[in-house]
Amino acid sequence: MREHGFKADSLLIKGARVIDPLSRLDAEWDLLLREGRIAELAPKHRIRGAAEETFDARGLVLAPGFIDMHVHLREPGQSQKETIATGTAAAAAGGFTSVCCMPNTSPVIDSQEWVRWLQQPERGARVNVFPIAAATMQSQGEALTDFPALKRAGAVGISDDGRPLLDGKLMRQALQLSSRLKLTVIQHAEDTRMTVSGSMHEGATSFRLGLRGMPGAAESAMVERDVKLAHSSGGHLHIAHLSTADALSFVRRAKRAKARVTCEVTPHHFTLTDQDIGDYDTNCKMNPPLRSAADREAILAGLADGSIDAIATDHAPHAAQEKQMEFERAPFGVTGLETALGLAISELHGKHQVPLIRIVELFTLGPARVLKLNGRGTLVPGNQADLTIFDPKRRWTFEAAASLSKSRNTPFDGWRLTGRLAMTMVSGRIVHYAL
Amino acid sequence: MSNLARGCLLGIEHLDRKDIFSILQLARRMNPSKPPPRLRGRRVLLLFYEPSTRTRSSFEVAAKALGAVTVLVQASGSSIEKGESLLDTGYTLRALGADVIVIRHPNAGAAMLLARHLDIPVVNAGDGMHEHPSQALLDAYTILRHKRTIDGLRVLIVGDIYHSRVARSACFLLSKLGARVTLCGPPEFVPDIASTLAPGIAVGRDLQEGLRGCDVVMLLRVQTERLAGEKIGLDQYIAGFQMTSGRLKWAKKDAILMHPGPIIRGLELTGEVADSPQSVIVEEVANGVPVRMAILARAVEKA
């Protein structure tokens, strides 16, 4: 990263196209930062306060800092894949000012002690790290963790990600607690009894490749059950990395019925399909798997029409030797922090005419609302100055070798993308600069 | 496919008609009793992660007939047991001077993975449920010794298609050469999606219907442990799909009966059918040698 010279306590960002989904603002405005917070936001030349320095942002979009509500930073325990320092450096390079890290580390984040450990300054995080704590002890699916204590320690959500909460009784209890504590329960929706030894989406491609399939029904059946439990309990259910048309239709129905149900999708699911696995490309192996073209179409529609609340990367780094394996033996997961913005603009805005303000919402206000991250995801004066500034027209080539993540397991190496990050600011401090 | 060593044979799906015919033509010129020493001084590494009798010995006989030195590496009793990765094993064999690696592996795509990382030809001797190209080629060779052409032939494949690499390779090959193929068996073994494998492939559930007008009947081995896993009764399978002399009469009079082996008499077929004049099961095994000689010669000479 190139260091940038802003050192002053106040900075005026001038002439940017400011997009703030909460106030539906999308216009050329100026923004004044002071002491790490947003001081003033006004139409061009209408800022009253004085600034020690000025940044000319003409041609760039200025948005609230992006939030990736689903990443795997691999610490504690798997630092050969990623660390909090390297993962958050990649996040900053991708325009994310906040990441929410999943608890499937070694050990599992199921205690206050580990939730606090993730947030300690010694971890060297470059952006805000909001821990998501395990729903059950060691994510074994047997005994619920102490939700109130985990929340007090700083957990912003509850999930056994990677391992679904199969037990309906436990899920019901978790959602009842969620209702009382205003804490979102995030489900990795997969009935694992249907996906045993599966390594990709079940369909014509898996049949042709001779790989055991993971049926779409394994996701949608679990979503259908959980939506019912959310409705009756009043808890907030969030479906992680939703990947099938059927599951999306259950989420839509639940929303119409005013249940507190939200969902996220990943850039790889809105960009690729199972056919992209080609000849066993393990960089296209993740869980949930790349789905059919029809599923992808449904997701694109859901992103445009508002049924989907957030884009999350499910950034899942793995060491090179772990992925250079027989497809069935390679671990699930791909990296995604540095390609999310470019893919969203190229695929959603460029090819499917999704307005930029909607894309910004999916990266900011959407996830902030799902996890009730107050003061994040909007440009309200007084808020921390978490800002993402990008050039929506700039074309660039993503090179995995230049990634700031420790791992390179991406299906997008060498992709030409439109939409490039210019600057990421966390509490008024520049954490990545790429102009 | 572009970064692979020439001469690889990883599957039928990536071959075109010309490739297939040229291998079959080369096989016809290979006389195992008067073999040309085209591989003299070459090393053929047989890397077998799964037990195999006929494929392994057939490749070994073929390689030796061409004058090659063969080395057999099996999962048990090697570094593979100690956790060495497939690629590291491949690099080791390459360093030992392998000219060709013939690999049998329980995971789909294993041969492709090895080929992508090595600069020597890799021959797929069966990868998981994916492909078994040498079997499909020897089947085509066998069919062409009995039928003038494969174009327009009606072929019925009966059995556990889902788990079968033999079936996938056969479907790709027969489709490319213009046969009309029906896959027959219960839905657990022959899901409807199987018809999407290649053009000209259909799924049928009724043996009698499938056999009508059929030129080639190909049976697959039924693993009893899989029957249990799929909740299909043995009796039920035998009642619906076992090939008997009576049922074989539903096919054309000159139909041939094939089976990649090993056969289980009394299960997918009766002993009487296995030994009938229409059965070419033993001939298939014999034809495996010239076809694999051709595959190895092509591998080394193209590389």
Image: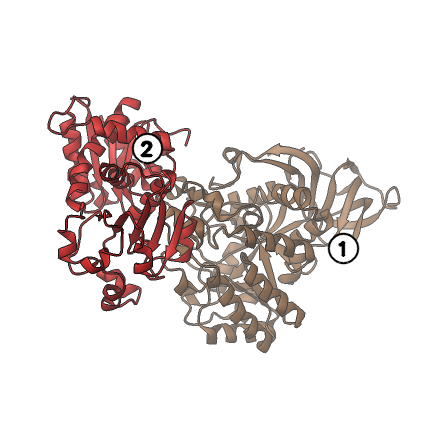
Asked whether A218 or B240 is in front, the reply is: B240
Tell me the CA gap for discs 2 and 1.
Answer: 72 Å
Quadrant of the rendered image containing residue B36: top left
Q: Secondary structure at mark 2?
A: helix
Percent position of residue A32, x then y: 79, 45
Query: As drawn, which residue projects farthest toward the front?
Result: B253
Residue at which label 2 appears: B20
Task: Identify the residue at horizontal 46%, vertical 42% (top origin).
Answer: A409
- Chain letter of disc 2 in the image: B
Task: Identify the residue at horizontal 15%, vertical 28% (top origin).
Answer: B31
Asked whether A270 or B280 is in front, the reply is: B280
Residue A363 located left or right of residue A335? right
Percent position of residue B228, x then y: 26, 65
Task: Look at chain B in the picture and name its colour.
Answer: red
State if disc 1 and disc 2 touch (CB < 8 Å). no
User: The N terminus of chain B appears in which quarter of the rendering?
Assistant: top left
Label 2 amino acid?
A: Ile
Q: Is residue A11 at all visible to an observer of this figure?
A: yes
Percent position of residue B284, x then y: 19, 42
Q: Residues within 10 Å of mark 2 (few under 14, many from 20)?
A: some
- Chain letter of disc 1 in the image: A
Residue at which label 1 appears: A382
Residue A104 located left or right of residue B277? right
Residue A72 located left or right of residue B240? right
Task: Identify the residue at horizontal 75%, vertical 51% (top origin).
Answer: A20
**Up-down relation of residue B45 to residue B202 (above or below):** above
Q: Residues within 10 Å of mark 1 (few under 14, many from 20)?
A: some
User: The C terminus of chain B appears in which quarter of the rendering?
Assistant: top left
Label 1 amino acid?
A: Gly
